[in-house]
Amino acid sequence: MSAPKGTLNVERRGWDKDKYEQRAKDREEYGDEYVDGKGAEAEIRDRQDWLTHRTGGFGFDKSAGCTKVLTEPEVQKKATGWYCDVCECLLRDSASYLDHINGKKHQRKLGYSMRVERVGVDAVRDRFADQTEKRAAAAAAVERHKTLDVGEEYERRLQQRDEDDAAEKAARREAKRQRKEERAAADQAEDPDFDAEMNAMMGFGGFGSSKKQR
């Protein structure tokens, strides 16, 4: 009779549910390539800044019709299009560039999480009060402009323009006077006998009292 076969001493593999649940959340927020990359977990933990709204525009219209001169090393690197210095990638048009800078990859490299800060009721009330105050101030400015007499506004602008022109002319005269004084001082420093020679040429050297010889 043959001996019974031995069995391997194995255990059923367990799974850390909390760990993989967190990885799933990070994957959803940061992307597969970031979570699966080397050192991704440490870099994710370092992100402290909340995602905030943009306060200004990018001025795409200012670049329309403009020509930018690139040096030779930059030509192959940047070529033609919108280049992102943060991510070192080239986008072909402004729409693609805008999508890129609003994306997860660009925001991660800037140090922002894709999560927004959760605030309380008091912060929301303060924000509403601030916006209400700004709108009231803007409406009051519009009303003041409506009630302002057109003739008075025209006269005020003319007076302001005249004052600005007068101040500009006075500044030009003062600058011209200073330049003349500086040139005269420089000429006198180079030639101390300049005034004496000039007076002699003009016939001013004989002024003064003199005794008649008897």
Image (cartoon, helix red, strand yellow):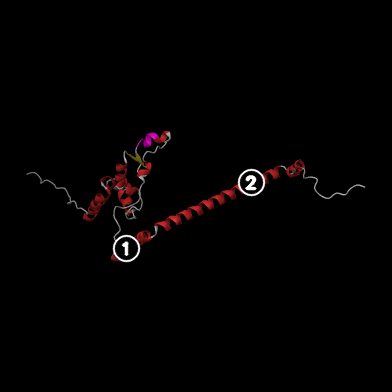
Whole-percent x, y for residue 6 in the image: 13, 47
Q: CA distance from mark 1 to mark 2?
A: 58 Å
The majority secondary structure of the magenta stretch comes to helix
Q: Dividing the picture into quarters, in which one does residue 5 lie?
A: top left
Q: Which span is picked out in magenta?
A: 75-80
Q: Where in the figure is residue 93, as x and y percent of width and height?
A: 31, 40
Q: Quadrant of the N terminus?
A: top left
* Place of residue 33 in the rendered image (x, y in percent of width and height, measured from the top left): 27, 45
Looking at marks 1 and 2 on the same chain, the residue that comes earlier in the sequence is marked by: 1
For label 1, the crowd category at 10 Å Cα-Cα, with few meaning under 14, some 14 to 19 and many 20 or more, is: few
Query: Which residue is denoted by mark 2 in the rendering?
Result: 180
Q: Is residue 179 left or right of residue 26?
A: right
Which residue is at the front of the view, 185 or 90?
185
Front residue of 66 and 160: 160
On the rendered structure, is 150 left or right of 25? right
| Residue to which mark 1 is pinned | 132
Residue flagged by tag 1: what amino acid is it?
A: Thr
User: Could you say which quadrant of the image residue 193 lies in?
Assistant: top right
Circle 2 residues within 10 Å: few <14, some 14–19, many ≥20: few
Residue lying at 32% horizontally and 64% vertically, measured from the top left? 129
Q: Position of residue 27 (x, y in %)?
A: 25, 49
Front-most of 117 and 143?
A: 143
Q: Is residue 81 above or below residue 114?
A: above
* In the image, residue 76 lies in the stretch drawn in magenta: yes
* Residue 42 lies within the magenta run: no
Q: Is residue 122 above or below residue 179?
A: below
Q: Residue at x 37, y 41 (%)?
A: 63
Q: Is residue 177 among the parts visible in the rendering?
A: yes
Decide which of 86, 64 is in the foreground and name it.
64
